[in-house]
Image (spheres, helix red, strand yellow):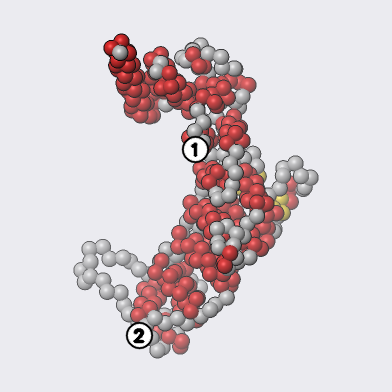
Amino acid sequence: MSEEESYMPYGERPEWQDVVPMPQQDAQNGLVPIAYSVEYSDAMDYFRAIAAEQEYSERVLALTEDIIRKNPAHYTVWQYRMNTLLALQTDLKKELQLMNEFAEENLKSYQVWHHRLTLISHMQPGLEDLQREIDFIHNSLMADTKNYHTWAYLNWLYSHFSNLPGTQGGNRFSEDEWARELEWCNHMLDSTYKFQRPSGTDKEDSGRQETHDPSDRVDQESMETLGRGDGRNNSAWSWRWHLVIARKGVKPNPAAEIEYALSQIRTIPHNASAWNYLRGIHKRFAIPLTESLPAILPFTTIPDSSTSELSSDAPNASTVTNTGTPLPVPFAIEWLADCEAEQAGDASSSASYERAAGLYHELGERWDVMRKTYWRHRQADVLRQASVDRENGQRDEIAAVTV
């Protein structure tokens, strides 16, 4: 029997006999009226009626659940449901269990995750509760590893419960907890890593046991693969930045992060995420780009070509890249060009400016043609800076002679 055939209108339900439904007031000759289903329109008519009376009851919970199952993005209904839960002093853990089902079915719904956030905020959970919630988030990301809403919720959970005042329980997370989260994040960025659990294990019960070292002696046929790491996952890179650089109380280790990013680049040389992370570390800690240049030069190798003095001593790229990796890597050429420009600015070297301009030209014409206009802009910009430096140098010389 279909849902339509089994559906009982609210007006025929005994518990709703005392409510007069409130139809939606649409324009009489609306240009593009929304084709609501009969069931949805019926439920919303009764929702408007109870909302007008500010009713908070068990039947309201049933009504709002019915509506959000039909339309998980209806934020007004979500908010009214939350207000009803609080007014009735309902066991929020039961609501959280219901939200497990909703999240699995509606991973992309911001409202589902926000409702979950609001629930956790009112529950004042202990560390064990938070660990279960973190496990749920981790498992949810297996189904959609780049879901922004899920990553944002994970960030909020750690940030919120690590910065509470003492009157609200204080920091819930020890450095050991942060270290475990970083280990999980590392797995998310490891393209060779498999997230696994024993076949038949309940998702809610798998918890942190979902990950297994591939070297463990387990019967692989009895393991269910939930997902794999992905070194190109921007969300995971952003989360790593928070864990090791941005979070309150962390002691950053720039050298270790530079080496981590370089190791990822060696694994996937054309990985924009790793290159951006490497640049971010250099910029955040004011580290000259040239400090990482020796490790990057192999990726600038151009067969039978020597474009830059800085790259003349580059080792054979085959010693550091995966077999079959197309060379040169445009990100590496850009890094080399920026190093030339950086050195030119420090020493007012017109030759370095010219080499940088030449590399930007090569990027636009040969190695990254899709962004030709951008590279022309970079080339013109560095030549403009060279002209300014020359003019400033000439003025300085004239001033020195005059004195």
Q: Where does residue 252 sit, x and y in percent of width and height?
A: 58, 41
Quadrant position of the C terminus in the picture: top left
Q: Nearer the viewer, residue 169 or 158?
A: 169
Residue located farthest toward the front when viewing the structure as drawn: 403
Q: Position of residue 122 (x, y in %)?
A: 53, 69
The residue located at (50%, 73%) in the rendering is 1
Amino acid type, label 1: Arg
User: Residue at horizontal 46%, vertical 14%?
Assistant: 307
Question: How far is disc 2 from disc 1 in space, using C-alphas?
Answer: 61 Å
Q: Nearer the viewer, residue 73 or 80?
A: 80
Kindly state the secondary structure of the residue where label 1 is placed: helix
Front in this rendered view, residue 9 or 193: 193
Residue 210 in the image, given as x and y percentages of width and height:
68, 53
**Quadrant of res 51:** bottom left
Report the residue marked by disc 1: 284
Secondary structure beneath dot 2 equals loop
Q: Is residue 123 above or below residue 380?
A: below
Using residue 325 as the reference point, say whether residue 54 is left or right of it. left
Q: Which residue sits furthest right?
A: 217
**Residue 225 visible somewhere in the drawing:** no
- Disc 2, disc 1: CB below 8 Å? no
Q: Earlier in the sequence, mark 2 or mark 1?
A: 2
**Marker disc for residue 137:** none
Asked whether the viewer can see residue 10, the reply is: yes
Q: Which residue is mark 2?
A: 20
Q: Residues within 10 Å of mark 1 (few under 14, many from 20)?
A: few
**Which residue is at 50% across, 27% downward?**
289
User: Relative to 320, is 67 above or below?
Assistant: below
Q: Residue at x 35, y 68 (%)?
A: 36
Image check: 358 left or right of 316? left
Q: Position of residue 228 (x, y in %)?
A: 61, 44
Q: Give the residue type at disc 2.
A: Val
